[in-house]
Image: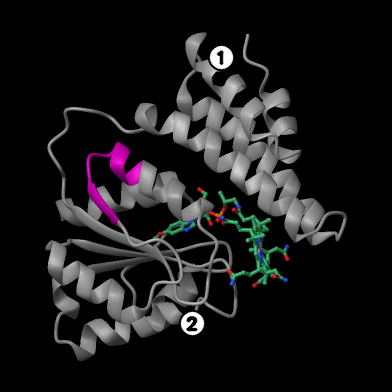
C-alpha cells in the first residue's frame, strides 16, 4: 500500500533518494502515476509553499524540496507520457524572462506530452524573442508561458506583443498560467487561454488544436 504521506514528508525534507525509492516502490505496487504525483509529491510541495509563505522555512529548504520533487517527477515521467501516440501538435513552453520557477512548467510539459503533443521545452528565464523564434523554427501550434512571480507575469504581454510585431500572432495560440495569473489577466494582455493547473492546460491545448 503506497504511503503518500511518507512521500510528501520525504519531499518536504528534501530527501531526493528517499522520494525516488518510494515513488519507484509505489509504481511497482501498481499505484497510478498521477495519484503518486498529486497525493504524494504535490501535497508535499503545497505544505512547503505554505511554510515558505509563513516564513517558517526559507529559500534553501524550498530549493532542496524542489529538487526532491524534480527527482520524483523524473521517475514518473515515462508513465505520465503515453507512448505510441502520433504527435497531436507542437508546443513551445517555457517560464518567462526573469523567472526561475520551473516545477509547474515541467508538470504542464508532462501533461502536454501525455496528451500526445511534441513539446519543445525552452526552460526558464525565456525571453519573448526566444518564445516566438522557437515557435517559428519548430512549426509550433501553441506557445505556453508560465510565470510564478507578479513581477514577471507582465513578460507574457511582451510575448503576445512580440508575436504581433513579427507578424505571426495569427499562427499561434498563446496559453498562459502560473500561480499569479488569472483569466482576467489573460484577456487583458490578449493571450488566447488561461488555465489554473497542468491537467486543464493539457485539455485546453487539445481543444485549441482541434478547433
Ligand atoms: Co519562489 N516564490 N521565489 N521559489 N516559490 C513563490 C512563487 C511565492 C508565491 C512564495 C511566497 O512568497 N509565498 C513567491 C512569489 C510572490 C509573488 O510574486 N506574488 C516567490 C518568491 C518571492 C521567490 C523569490 C523572489 C524569493 C527570493 O529570492 N527572495 C525567488 C525568485 C527567483 C526567480 O524566479 N527569479 C524565488 C525562488 C524560488 C526557488 C528557486 C527557491 C524555488 C523554485 C525552484 C524551481 O522551480 N525549480 C521556489 C519555489 C519552489 C516556490 C514555491 C514555494 C513553490 C512553487 C512551486 O513549484 N509550486 C512558491 C510558493 C507557492 O506556490 N505556494 C514560490 C508547485 C507547482 C506545481 O505549482 O508552479 O504554481 P505552480 O504550477 C501549477 C499552476 O500554477 C499551473 O500548473 C501547476 C500545477 O498543476 N501552471 C500553469 C504553472 N504554469 C502554468 C502554465 C500554464 C497553465 C498552468 O499554461 C501555459
On whether residue 115 falls in the magenta region, the answer is yes
Q: Residue at x 24, y 67 (%)?
A: 173
Give the CA distance from mark 1 to mark 2: 42 Å
Q: Residue at x 51, y 62 (%)?
A: 178
Q: In the displayed structure, does residue 73 sit left or right of residue 62?
A: left
Q: In the displayed structure, does residue 64 sit left or right of residue 123?
A: right
Nearest the camera: 37 or 174?
37
Nearest the camera: 128 or 46?
128
The reply to whether residue 106 is visible in this rendering is: yes
Residue at image mark 2? 154
On whether residue 72 falls in the magenta region, the answer is no
User: In this picture, is 69 found above or below 75?
Assistant: below
Residue at image mark 1? 25
Q: Quadrant of residue 141?
A: bottom left
Q: Residue furthest right?
A: 56
Q: Position of residue 7 (x, y in %)?
A: 67, 27
Label 2 crowd (10 A; few <14 / some 14-19 / many >=20): some
Q: Residue furthest front?
A: 17
* Image quadrant in which the N terminus is located: top right
Q: Residue furthest bottom?
A: 165
Residue 148 marker: none
- Indicate which quadrant contains ligand 1: bottom right
Q: Quadrant of residue 128?
A: bottom left
* Image quadrant in which the C terminus is located: bottom left
The reply to whether residue 30 is visible in this rendering is: no
Q: In the displayed structure, does residue 162 sit left or right of residue 69?
A: left
Query: Which residues lie in the magenta part?
Result: 111-120
User: In this picture, is 108 found above or below 77?
Assistant: below
Asked whether disc 1 touches disc 2, contact meaning CB atoms under 8 Å apart, the reply is no
Label 1 crowd (10 A; few <14 / some 14-19 / many >=20): some
Q: Position of residue 192 (x, y in %)?
A: 31, 69
Badge 1 or badge 2: first in the primary sequence = 1
Amino acid at each position: 500500500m503506497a504511503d503518500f504521506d511518507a512521500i510528501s514528508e520525504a519531499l518536504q525534507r528534501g530527501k531526493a533518494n528517499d522520494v525516488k525509492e518510494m515513488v519507484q516502490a509505489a509504481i511497482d505496487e501498481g499505484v497510478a502515476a498521477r495519484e503518486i504525483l498529486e497525493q504524494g509529491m504535490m501535497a508535499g510541495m503545497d505544505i512547503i509553499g505554505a511554510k515558505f509563505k509563513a516564513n517558517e522555512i526559507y529559500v534553501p529548504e524550498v530549493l532542496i524540496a524542489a529538487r526532491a520533487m524534480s527527482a520524483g517527477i523524473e521517475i514518473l515521467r515515462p508513465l505520465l507520457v503515453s507512448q505510441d501516440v502520433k504527435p497531436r501538435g507542437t508546443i513551445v513552453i517555457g517560464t518567462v524572462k526573469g523567472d526561475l520557477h520551473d516545477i509547474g512548467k515541467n508538470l504542464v510539459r508532462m501533461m502536454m506530452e501525455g496528451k500526445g503533443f511534441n513539446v519543445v521545452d525552452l526552460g526558464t528565464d525565456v525571453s519573448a524573442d526566444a518564445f516566438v523564434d522557437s515557435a517559428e523554427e519548430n512549426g509550433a501550434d501553441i506557445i505556453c508561458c508560465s510565470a510564478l512571480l507578479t513581477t514577471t507575469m507582465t513578460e507574457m504581454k511582451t510575448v503576445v506583443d512580440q508575436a504581433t510585431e513579427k507578424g505571426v500572432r495569427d499562427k499561434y495560440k498563446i496559453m498562459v498560467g502560473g500561480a499569479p495569473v488569472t483569466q482576467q489577466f489573460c484577456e487583458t494582455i490578449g493571450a488566447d487561454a488561461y488555465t489554473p493547473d497542468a491537467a486543464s492546460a493539457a485539455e485546453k491545448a487539445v481543444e485549441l488544436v482541434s478547433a
